[in-house]
Image: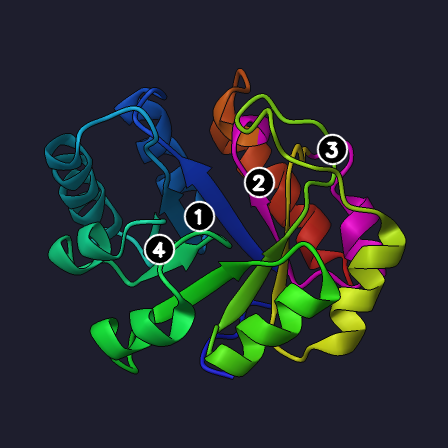
Amino acid sequence: MKENMQRCLYIIADFSYAEETIAAVLEAGIDYIQLREKQVSSAEYLMRAKKLRRMTARYHTKLMINDRLDIAALSNADGVHLGQSDIPIRDARSFLGAAKIIGATAKTPAQAIKAQEDGADYLGSGAWFPTSTKRDAVPITEETYQAILAATHIPNIAVGGLTAANCSRPLSLGAHGLAISAGILASQDPAAEVKKIRQILASVI
């Protein structure tokens, strides 16, 4: 396993959130931050990725880029997170090299097994709850999630509508970490939410 993602806190962000908000969660202490920009040009996406790369360089936070292999490479991000309709994992690995991190969305055991076989370093599985940041997200059942965990051995990060109030549910089933967006970034005190969820992660045996 390339990455130890046990008790990992993984933020999914875009610059619709204030730069000060993103800086605050980095300062509070997170493991990963994924830049997911859906409504901007490629040039703007790259500019934002480079800005976030400079911000993460001040901390021990790894930068992941959503979907875009080219943006990940050009911004010198730590890796890329790929969905089912993105560049195949094997091609991404060939392009980025062995040292970069590749994550994959997996909503079924079959998708999870294929991603693992193709060389993904971790999986993201959800959505656990309705989320305003991805309105078309299909809910995952506990049974499906347990089947994904049973079928694979690489880390699995729970994602989708997670907050401090509900994140214990996937953790109780064996999630290695939590991917959170609005549940932290849209809160009144994002840094306090980071600390609160860190405490929940630390309590997991």
Residue 48's place in the image compared with 86, above or below, is: above
The magenta segment: 164-183
Residue type (three-letter) at the residue carrying disc 3: Phe
Mark 4 / mark 2, whichever is N-terminal: 4
Percent coordinates x, y for residue 16 in the rendering: 33, 20
Residue under pointer 1: 29
Circle 3/circle 4 CB separation < 8 Å:
no
Q: Secondary structure at mark 3?
A: loop
Residue 7's place in the image compared with 199, above or below, is: below
Comparing marks 3 and 2, which lies closer to the viewer?
3
Residue type (three-letter) at the residue carrying disc 1: Gly
Residue under pointer 4: 61
Distance from disc 1 to disc 4, alpha carbons, whole Å, reads: 8 Å
| Residue at image location 40% in from the left, 66% down from the top | 88
Q: Secondary structure at mark 1?
A: loop
| Residue at image location 63% in from the left, 26% down from the top | 131
Distance from disc 4 to disc 2, alpha carbons, whole Å, reads: 15 Å
Residue 101's place in the image compared with 61, above or below, is: below
Residue 184, picture quadrant? top right
Residue under pointer 3: 129
